[in-house]
Image (spheres, helix red, strand yellow):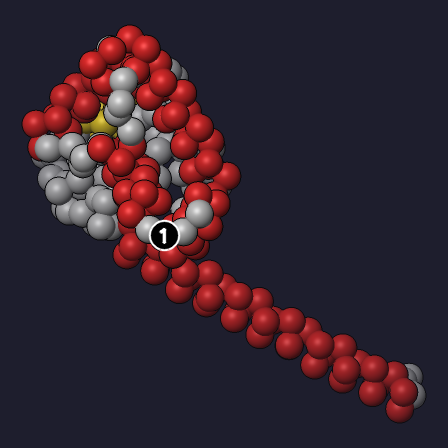
Amino acid sequence: FSSESDEYDSIKVQELLVRKKKRAEAKKDELRKRRHEAKKLHSKWGGEDTASDVLCEAKCVGAYFHFKHSSNLSSQAAQEAFCRDNYVYKKTLNEIELLCEMVLEQIKKTLQRLEGLTFRDLRPPTKQQEGMLLQMLTGGLVMNVAMRCKVFDADGREIQNTGKRVLQYECMEHNDPVYIHPSSFLYRKQPELIVYKEQFKTTRYASE
């Protein structure tokens, strides 16, 4: 049995749930839209020819320093504006900036001829310099090399990678398969060998 009041309450609850569902769907759509926009913005630092996510991050930091020193904004205002317009975490960028300043001071102390060097003087790396940076990264993370697992059909023939399947990789840390995270610029390429900086577990993927 239900009274008129109970029926009224049940309708109100149903309307509330529907509205909550609509709000949740709207939030998902907005989040999806923002992710797409962020990915499009970040592609200017890492396009189709990108060989490393780390280089993309370095280019992002370089772009920030260029923006900071070329704008008329204060240091804090420039940081907030850059992070807002480029979908960059302010806290992370702030920590990177402090580390860069510490490294620059050490370089100045070691190399007297660079005593007057500032971030304003820095230029984006050339292709040759990018290659040298990749060699250094590979040398420092040699134990973090992962190789793409080969896939065979029922007749024992290797299936060539078309970039449409999520492929497994094997690493030296453990025997579990690992994957390139979708946020990586290498996700669509899925190269034969990768060098990763960290592994983490998610509900679907295990490595970046």
User: Is residue 97 positioned above or below 6 on the image?
Assistant: above
Horizontal side of 117 relative to 24 (left or right) equals left
Horizontal side of 22 relative to 194 (left or right) equals right
Write down the quadrant of residue 53 in the picture. Answer: top left
Q: Residue at x 44, y 47 (%)?
A: 74
**Going by the picture, which residue comes out furthest to the front?**
116
**Mark 1: which amino acid?**
Asn
Q: Position of residue 173 (x, y in %)?
A: 37, 15
Q: Count numbered badges in the picture.
A: 1
- Quadrant where the C terminus sits is top left
Horizontal side of 75 relative to 23 (left or right) equals left
Mark 1: give few (<14), some (14-19) or many (20+) Cα within 10 Å.
few
Q: Which of 193 and 86 is in front in this view?
A: 86
Q: Position of residue 186 (x, y in %)?
A: 23, 39
Q: Which residue is drawn at 13% across and 42% down?
A: 49
Q: Which residue is drawn at 46% across and 50% down?
A: 77
Write down the quadrant of residue 20 in the picture. Answer: bottom right
User: Is residue 43 positioned above or below 3 on the image?
Assistant: above
Q: Nearer the viewer, residue 56 or 9?
A: 56
Please indicate, yes or no, whether residue 192 appears anywhere in the rendered image: yes
Q: Nearer the viewer, residue 145 or 36?
A: 36
Q: Where is residue 163 in the image (x, y as percent from the top left)?
A: 18, 46
Residue annotated with mark 1? 72
Question: Please, what secondary structure does the residue beneath circle 1 have?
Answer: loop
Q: Which residue is drawn at 15% across and 47% down?
A: 48
Q: Position of residue 96 (x, y in %)?
A: 41, 31
User: Is residue 122 positioned above or below 138 on the image?
Assistant: below
